[in-house]
C-alpha cells in the first residue's frame, strides 16, 4: 500500500475514534454513490454529520481542510441526498471536516463542524 494511502486509512480510523469519544454513533464508512465517497456518516442526536477526513503529513502546503474542492462538495451532497432518501431518514444533515496533521509520532486533530454548506 502506498504511504499516503496508509496515512489516509490511519487518519480515518483516528477520526472514527475521535467521534466515538465525543458521543457520535458511526452509521456508515466509505459510503459510495456515483463518483463520490463519503468517509464517515455519524449520528449525533437528531443530526447526521457527514464527515470528510483530510490527513496530511505536513501543513507545509496548506491546511488539510483547504483540499476539499467545490466539485467534491457537490458529489458529497449528491451521495448524502441519495443515502438519506434511500434510508428514509428524518434528520438534519451537517457537513464537517476532520483535519489531521501528523506531527512527528503524534497527530493533531481538528474537527470543523458545519465546514461547508449544501445548496
Image: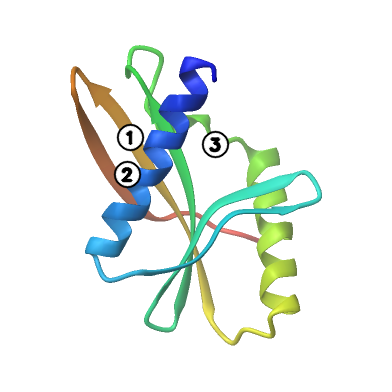
Tell me which residue sits at (19%, 17%) in the image. 104
In this rendering, is residue 7 above or below 68?
Answer: above
Label 3: element kind: loop
Density class for disc 3 (Cα within 10 Å; few <14, some 14-19, many ≥20) is some
Instruction: Give whichever of discs 2 and 1 has the lower sequence position.
Output: 2
Query: Residue 22 at x, y = what percent?
Result: 24, 65
Name the residue beneath numbered marker 3: 68
**Tag nearer the camera, 2 or 3:** 2
Residue found at the far front of this picture: 1
**Relative horizontal placement of residue 118, taking residue 21 as reference (left or right):** right
How far apart, in angstroms, are the residues tagged by discs 2 and 3? 19 Å
Residue at image coords 45%, 76%? 47
Spatial CA distance of label 2 from label 1 is: 9 Å
Looking at the picture, tell me which residue is in the foreground, 5 or 92: 5
Residue 74 visible in the shown view: no
Rendered image quadrant of residue 23: bottom left
Q: Nearer the viewer, mark 3 or mark 1?
A: 1
Rendered image quadrant of residue 79? bottom right
In the picture of the structure, the residue carrying the numbered disc 1 is 100
Q: Nearer the viewer, residue 21 or 61?
A: 21
Quarter the N terminus occupies: top right
Counting other residues with Cα less than 10 Å from the Cα at mark 2, is it few (<14), some (14-19), or many (20 or more)?
A: some
In-front residue for pair 20/90: 20
- The residue beneath circle 2 is 14
Label 1 secondary element: strand
On screen, residue 95 above or below 93: above
Are discs 3 and 1 less than 8 Å apart at CB? no
Amino acid at each position: 500500500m502506498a504511504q499516503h494511502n496508509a496515512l489516509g486509512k490511519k487518519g480515518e480510523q483516528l477520526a472514527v475514534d475521535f467521534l466515538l469519544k465525543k458521543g457520535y454513533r458511526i452509521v456508515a464508512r466509505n459510503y459510495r454513490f456515483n463518483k463520490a465517497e463519503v468517509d464517515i456518516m455519524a449520528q449525533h442526536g437528531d443530526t447526521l454529520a457527514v464527515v470528510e477526513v483530510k490527513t496530511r503529513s505536513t501543513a507545509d502546503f496548506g491546511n488539510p481542510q483547504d483540499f476539499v474542492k467545490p466539485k467534491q462538495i457537490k458529489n458529497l451532497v449528491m451521495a448524502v441526498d441519495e443515502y438519506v432518501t434511500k434510508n428514509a431518514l428524518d434528520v438534519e444533515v451537517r457537513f464537517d471536516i476532520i483535519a489531521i496533521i501528523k506531527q512527528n509520532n503524534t497527530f493533531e486533530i481538528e474537527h470543523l463542524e458545519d465546514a461547508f454548506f449544501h445548496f
